[in-house]
Image (spheres, helix red, strand yellow):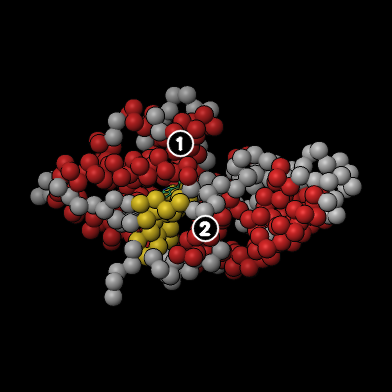
């Protein structure tokens, strides 16, 4: 039998995951888990680069992000869920790779720039500036072939490939060059009309939100601001609720747009429909989540076992890497 290709992807453990993560990445992880050897990284070290003053939040989020992944249907029997800080090869590779990357390259990384601005950093910490190098270690310690990510991660993928090529060239090693796998919908607009749904933006629908919260949030979502009365024809092309129907309720979307344009459906009814569709999607996730929430020991065991397995693979990679670098005695 041909060996399955390996996927590695991950989430920063800085809070719970939301619908943007779901359409951007989680959904495709579930679809791919049967055909690929899938590794899901709980990126707690990367979380610390921006949230080092909030260790309790990170501790809690390690569990919550693991549960987010499990709740949408990732099967712990099939996928490997691992905790970044437990994997010694990641720390070691980060150190070796850091020699091959210039500070200026990192300073010019567009994602680093955007994030530094968003966090209000002007004098970047060594660790924050270097997290893309650590991400390269995340991807290569297990020799991942494919990395499902959103668009914002492409600069990090480019860097990873560059590091791998340089490393192989310098030391005659043969680490595989990983490929990015872009999701169809790599960005979900926020409920407030912001281009992106984000934890820190206060415009997110969480996978862990209950039905009433989803209804309340959808009720407040931005619609066509020129539509004052139900009798006014609406403009679905500028309406956030319409965009959500398009993604989460595709079979009804065209119909709803027509009704909106002809003023035969009002925003209240349209939002009610959307909330019902979203709750229909989230209900089975809530059921799984409730199970894991009451079996945290099991979640811990899943993470520990996944990390142990990842360490065996990582130690093997480090043996090869150190040999190639002529530092193995
Ligand atoms: N930087 C990614 C994000 O913000 C998270 C991440 C960490 C990751 N390590 C990774 C993604 C390795 C893919 C592969 O979403």
Give residue 26's mark.
2
Whether label 2 lies within 8 Å of ligand 1 gets the answer no
Position of 84 with respect to 285 (left or right) is: left
Image point (39%, 50%), residue name: 180
Image point (38%, 59%), residue name: 7
Q: Which residue is identified by label 1?
A: 111
Q: Position of residue 264 (x, y in %)?
A: 85, 54
Looking at the image, the residue that sits furthest to the left is 329
Is residue 169 depicted above or below 255 in this figure? above
Mark 2, Cα crowd under 10 Å, few <14 / some 14-19 / many 20+, is many
Q: Position of residue 144 (x, y in %)?
A: 33, 56
Q: 103 or 16, which is in the foreground?
A: 103
SS state under label 1: helix
Position of 292 with respect to 241 (left or right) is: left
Quarter residue 160 falls in:
top left
Q: Position of residue 86 (x, y in %)?
A: 37, 53
Looking at the image, the residue that sits furthest to the top is 122
SS state under label 2: helix
Image point (74%, 47%), residue name: 236
Nearer-N-terminus badge (2/1): 2
Q: 102 or 62, which is in the foreground?
A: 102
Mark 1, Cα crowd under 10 Å, few <14 / some 14-19 / many 20+, is some
Q: Is residue 243 visible?
A: yes
Q: Is residue 86 visible?
A: no
């Amino acid at each position: 039998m041909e060996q399955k290709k390996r996927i590695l992807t991950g989430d920063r453990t800085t809070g719970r995951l939301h619908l943007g993560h779901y359409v951007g990445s989680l959904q495709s992880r579930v679809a791919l888990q049967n055909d690929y050897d899938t590794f899901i990284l709980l990126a707690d070290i990367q979380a610390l680069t921006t949230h080092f003053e909030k260790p309790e939040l990170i501790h809690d989020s390690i569990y919550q992000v693991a549960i987010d992944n499990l709740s949408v249907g990732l099967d712990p029997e099939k996928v490997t869920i691992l905790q970044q800080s437990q994997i010694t090869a990641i720390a070691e590779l980060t150190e070796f790779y850091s020699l091959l990357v210039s500070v200026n390259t990192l300073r010019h990384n567009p994602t680093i720039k955007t994030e530094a601005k968003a966090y209000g950093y002007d004098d970047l910490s060594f660790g924050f500036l270097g997290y893309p190098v650590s991400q390269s270690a995340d991807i290569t310690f297990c020799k991942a072939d494919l990395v499902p990510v959103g668009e914002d991660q492409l600069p990090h993928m480019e860097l990873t490939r560059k590091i791998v090529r340089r490393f192989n060239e310098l030391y005659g090693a043969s680490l595989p060059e990983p490929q990015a796998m872009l999701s169809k919908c790599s960005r979900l607009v926020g409920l407030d009309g912001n281009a992106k749904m984000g934890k820190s933006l206060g415009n997110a629908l969480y996978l862990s939100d209950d039905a009433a919260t989803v209804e309340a949030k959808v009720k407040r979502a931005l619609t066509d601001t020129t539509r004052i009365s139900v009798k006014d024809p609406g403009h679905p092309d500028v309406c956030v609720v319409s965009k959500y129907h398009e993604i989460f309720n595709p079979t009804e979307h065209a119909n709803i747009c027509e009704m909106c344009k002809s003023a035969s459906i009002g925003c209240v009814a349209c939002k009610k429909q959307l909330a019902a569709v979203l709750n229909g999607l989230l209900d089975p996730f809530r059921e799984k989540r409730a199970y894991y929430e009451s079996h945290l020991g099991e979640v811990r065991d899943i993470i520990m076992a996944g990390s142990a397995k990842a360490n065996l693979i990582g130690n093997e990679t480090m043996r090869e890497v150190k040999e190639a670098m002529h530092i193995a005695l």
